[in-house]
Every structure is written in C-alpha cells, then in structure tokens.
Image (cartoon, grey):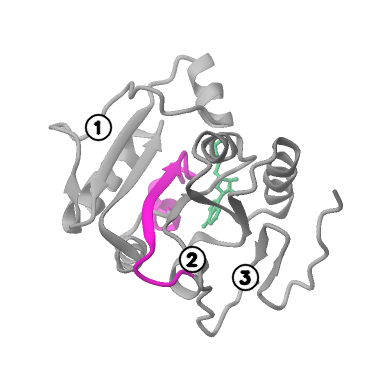
Amino acid sequence: MEFPWWDKKNVSLFDQILFLPPVLSNPVPIAFNQELYIEFCSGNGLWVVQKALDNPGNLWVAVEKKLERAKKIWNRAKRLGAQNLLVVCGSAENMVTAILPSPLVKEVFINFPDPWPKFRHAKHRLIQDSFVRALQNKMVSGGKITFVTDDISYLEQGLVVLKKTMKPLLPEPFYSKDPENYGSSFFEEMWRKKNKTIYYTAYANY
Ligand SMILES: C[S@@+](CC[C@H](N)C(=O)[O-])C[C@H]1O[C@@H](n2cnc3c(N)ncnc32)[C@H](O)[C@@H]1O
C-alpha cells in the first residue's frame, strides 16, 4: 500500500488517514457517524491498532503529530486489517479544537505523552486546563479519559488538572499501577523492561 501524498497546507482526508496542517485557522469539523475512541500521542500505534482489532465495532482514532510515526501506524493498521481505525497526522490540540464535532467522543486514552520533565518545560505538556476543557466539550456525558505515564511529576499535574472538572474513577490516591488487560505500547514495554513504575489514572465526564 502506497502512503498518501500530502500538500501540508490543507486538511486532507485519504484512505484512513487525516492530515492536519500545523496552522489551522478555521474549524473544519468532520461529520463522523459514530462515537469515537481516541488515543492521543500514539507513537508507532502498537497499542491503538490492537485496540481497534480487538473492538471492531468501535471507531478508533490515533492522533500522532510526527509524520514518520503516523506512517507507521497507518502501515500497521493496513497490514493487520484494522479498518475501523483513522490515523490523524497532526497535533492533539488542533484535532480537539478544530476537527472534532461535539459531543461524539466516548473514550480518550493518552498513553505516555511527552513528559517534559524539566520544570521550565512543563508548560508544553499536553494535559493542561485548556486542553482538557476543550476536550470535555467534545465528549459525551459519561465519557472517559485514561492517562498513563511513568513520570510522577506529570502524573501529579494530570491529577490536579483532571479533578478540576471531571470525576475520578479510581479510589484515592486516584491512580493504579497494574490495571488488567490494558494493552501494551512501545513505551510501556520499554519502561517495564527497565522496571519503571507506570501510573494509570481515569476520569469521567459528568
Ligand atoms: C513518548 S511517545 C509515546 C508513544 C506511545 N503512546 C507509546 O506509548 O509508545 C509520545 C508521542 O506523542 C507524540 N506527540 C507529542 N505531542 C503531541 C501532540 N501535541 N499531538 C500529537 N502527538 C504528540 C510524539 O510525537 C510521540 O510520538
């Protein structure tokens, strides 16, 4: 399968891949015809392609800003026959603010987003008040966000941000270290091999 060509200036939808230019001035909501299960920051797509294969009745979306990684997700989905997966090559922020119609998002997964570990860089983290509020506007009532990280400082920031407007689904301390059957990703496997602790947290939109 030939990976589609893209002019980098316009929003373009090809065979199972949506390209978003970095600068998107106008909202261009896409009319999806069923609820969405979205993974932001998908990397090479190991986790999300498997979820799409395991749950063929759901429409899955993998959002990854790096072209080379989006290509890998698309190739994997094509090779394994995951026809219910749309790959979005673009930023999570653009996807949420300009592309997603509301309220259509049933579940969101953010697995190992870039941790930006230095304090002065923490402002670049994806899980911020503005992002979560914009996302909630696109979620169905009872929709769920799952956030997974190995970075304790990002976990703490995530718990603070998410609890402002959402309901925790796990008892105090509001995270778990070993959920059952969550699935595995490239970073999850890498950190497990290095015996790093991994934190999972989940919140609901009510
Ligand atoms: C640490 S990797 C984790 C990849 C994958 N989730 C995993 O667990 O293996 C983070 C990924 O998020 C992507 N990313 C970072 N910021 C993003 C954003 N704002 N929107 C979309 N993707 C983003 C990066 O390009 C990278 O592929």
Q: Residue at x 40, y 52 (%)?
A: 122
Label 2 vs 3, first from the N-terminus: 3
Say if mark 2 contacts mark 3, CB within 8 Å.
Answer: no
Q: Inspect the image, locate mark 1, and give the three-letter code of the amino acid beneath it.
A: Tyr
Mark pair 1, 3: CA separation: 33 Å
Instruction: Please indicate whether residue 133 sits to the left or right of residue 23 in the image.
Output: left
Left or right for 206, reference 34? left
Number of the label disc, if any, that sits on residue 22: 3
Q: Which residues are magenta?
A: 100-125
Measured Cα–Cα span from mark 2 to mark 3: 26 Å
Nearest the viewer among 78 and 155 is 78
Give the farthest residue toward the left. Answer: 172
Q: Pointer 2: what residue?
A: 33
The location of residue 195, given as percent across then percent down, is 45, 14
Q: Mark 2 and 1 residues: CB-CB less than 8 Å, in contact?
A: no
Q: Which mark is residue 175?
A: 1
**Considering the image in quadrants, where does the C terminus appear?**
bottom left
Secondary structure found at label 1:
loop
Q: Picture coordinates of residue 20 (x, y %)?
A: 63, 69
Q: Disc 3 marks which amino acid?
A: Pro
Dividing the picture into quadrants, the one containing residue 150 is: top left
Q: Indicate which disc, 1 or 3, sits on the residue closer to the N terminus.
A: 3
In this rendering, the label closer to the viewer, 2 or 1? 2
> How far separated are the C-alphas under marks 2 and 1?
33 Å
- Would you place residue 34 above or below residue 81 in this image? below
Which residue reaches farthest bottom?
26
Q: Residue at the spot x=32%, y=60% of the render?
A: 132
